[in-house]
Amino acid sequence: MKILFFGTKSYDKKFFEETWNKNEYKDIRLDYIETLLEPDTAVLAKGYDAVCAFVNMDLGTRTIKTLSECGVKLILMRCAGFNNVDIAEAQKCGITVMRVPGYSPEAVAEHAMALALTANRHTHKAYVRVRENDFSLNGLMGTTLYGKTAGIIGTGKIGSAMAKICRGFGMNVIAYDMYENPELDFVKYVEFDTLLKDSDLISLHCPLTEETYHLINKDTISKMKQGVILVNTSRGSLIKTEDLISGIRDKRFFAVGLDVYEEEDENVYENLSDSILQHSTVARLLNFPNVCVTSHQGFFAKEALEAISSTTLENALCFMNGKKNGNEVF
Ligand code: NAI
């Protein structure tokens, strides 16, 4: 099986090569390119059985059609989310889509808590200040999480890891999900509006779907507690950014931590320090002293990269042997 690995970064290659060498995947050949998979680059997959892609690529209708014309039979998403893949088109073209449903959920949950703590206690600003010999504390005051209420939206793998972390901080944990997670006996499930009203910290862990698109908007923000801390490590479009910015300006939020945001696609994983940004979203968000933004790095921990590379290659092997392992998207 020949796989074309799109959007390769040095760390991707390191972990995939190590896994490939360890496990004798000799019937699988991996070719790495830095190019992102998009409608105009999909043609590079000609002659390959499979492509390997990530969250920052465009696997919409045009890309899938081209992949199909090139003879590709398998899309290996080296991530959990697949909202950037036109699944219906893939199905129509007879292309199987596989993903890595759960790689170190703790890696993402720990990053969510790191963002909450950083934005709340202004560690990002304190770090810079002290380096400039400015030892003053004005503007750095935070709040304690102990004894406060954490509201978790979506209690799947990552949400439940976050719920456990919040409990460890001495927080009262409430959650909203259509399905209650029986593992979380310390969590009280509540209606969505109750979660918005009662939470001091809201952390988003549901997938991006038609239903959850712009889940956080003017209306839902108006129902939140004054001075809430909001964290999003799930997908940017769960939050309507314009409404978030208005809410921040209206001082509704004590702190906001974002690992994902709308319009991130053109920035994510690229060093644009010498470029003039074409979108103003990040610039505007970075302007607020109580907002901390990272570049979709929740997954970026050693254990997660090991799990991603081994599950992705296992997925390829399974497909090659005509078997199913449950990681198929449909
Ligand atoms: P999961 O599938 O284990 O859990 C998702 C949960 O959300 C499920 O319990 C589901 O019932 C619930 N849900 C679905 N629709 C909902 C709604 N309308 N309201 C409330 N709950 C709803 O997924 P997992 O592994 O926990 O990942 C969650 C999300 O995290 C992924 O969809 C992905 O977007 C994001 N993610 C972000 C990463 C990062 O690097 N920042 C890395 C990995 C995932």
Image (tube, rainbow, N blue to C red):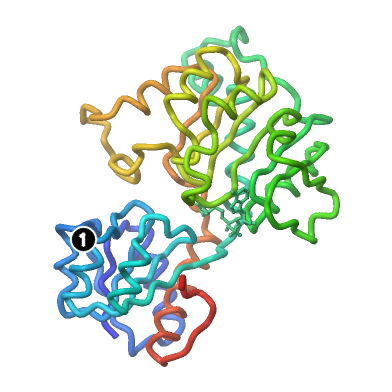
Disc 1 crowd, CA 10 A, few/some/many (<14, 14-19, 20+): some
Residue at x 31% of width, y 25% of height: 280
Q: Nearer the viewer, residue 8 or 246?
A: 246
Give the quarter of the figure containing the N terminus: bottom left
Residue 66 percent across, percent down from the top left: 18, 68
Question: Left or right of 210: which side holds 119?
Answer: right
Amino acid on which disc 1 is placed: Arg
The answer to which image quadrant residue 169 occupies is top right
Q: Residue at x 25, y 29 (%)?
A: 277
* Residue 197 in the image: above or below residue 317: above
Mark 1 Cβ inside 8 Å of ligand 1: no
Image height check: is 187 above or below 34?
Answer: above
What residue occupies the far bottom of the structure in this picture? 321
Q: Looking at the image, which is closer to me, 305 or 187?
A: 187
Residue hosting label 1: 62
User: Which of 301 and 207 lies nearest the eye of the viewer?
Assistant: 207
In the picture, measured across the screen, residue 73 lies left or right of residue 118, that is: left
Residue at 59% x, 26% y: name it: 221
